[in-house]
Amino acid sequence: MLNYELKLVDSSKLLADILVDDIGNSLKKFKEMLDVALLDKYPESMRAARILALCAEKNKKLVCPYVNQLVQQLEHVNVEGVKRGFLKILSENSECLDRDSWGIIANLAFEWMNNPKEAISIRYYCIDLMGQLQDQYPEIKEELISILESIMEDESKGLRTKCIKTLRKLNR
């Protein structure tokens, strides 16, 4: 059993802050928390993914060595909170992704953002990632616009707002 797995006893902000401080700038400790997230075991993995996202916000240098590993694992993740946390990390650290990882993200994001059974937060981060990908690969623009317009027809207000913002960016 991993040391951090034992420490993830609840989802409180206080515990999250304590663990983020404990990880600090340590790649070794960040990797240990990543290993807990990759166990794909609810609720520990979900809590670990949240800690990773908070660490990545504080120190992007921690996450860059692992973003491509996150992408490789993403399609095998079953815990919704882990998927959401990984997508958030990737969305906020996309400059660290290599070309192969972007290809995997594109396939997964197109699938997940079109799936009304996916959580809104997962679809939200997929839209964000596809907007970023379109900056590098403008040839996906028309397909992305079509998908965003179809999502807007029958989705939550938050997801509609994200679609509208992304469409405005695409139509500049």
Image (tube, rainbow, N blue to C red):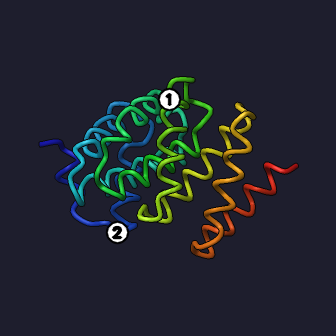
Quadrant position of the N terminus in the picture = top left
- In this image, 10 relative to 51: left or right? left
Mark 1 surroundings: few (<14), some (14-19) or many (≥20) residues within 10 A? some
Q: Which residue is mark 2?
A: 12
- In this image, 66 relative to 28: left or right? right
Q: Position of residue 17 (x, y in %)?
A: 41, 58
Nearer to the camera, 51 or 92: 92
Question: Which numbered marker is on residue 134?
Answer: none
Instruction: Name the mark nearer the viewer: 2 or 1.
Output: 1
Q: Earlier in the sequence, mark 2 or mark 1?
A: 2
Callout 2 touching callout 1 (CB < 8 Å): no
Q: Position of residue 18 (x, y in %)?
A: 36, 57
Q: Which residue is mark 1?
A: 101
* Amino acid type of the residue tagged 1 in the rendering: Ser
Residue at screen point 40% across, 36% down: 70
Residue at screen point 17% across, 42% down: 2
Query: In the current view of this chain or complex, which residue is farthest to the right?
Result: 172
Query: In the current view of this chain or complex, which residue is farthest to the left?
Result: 1
Q: Position of residue 131 (x, y in %)?
A: 68, 46
- Depicted 29 relative to depicted 172: above or below: above
The CA span between labels 2 and 1 is: 32 Å
Classify mark 1: helix, strand or loop.
helix
* Amino acid type of the residue tagged 2 in the rendering: Ser
* Residue 13 sits in quarter: bottom left
Nearer to the camera, 59 or 163: 163
Residue at screen point 52% across, 42% down: 90
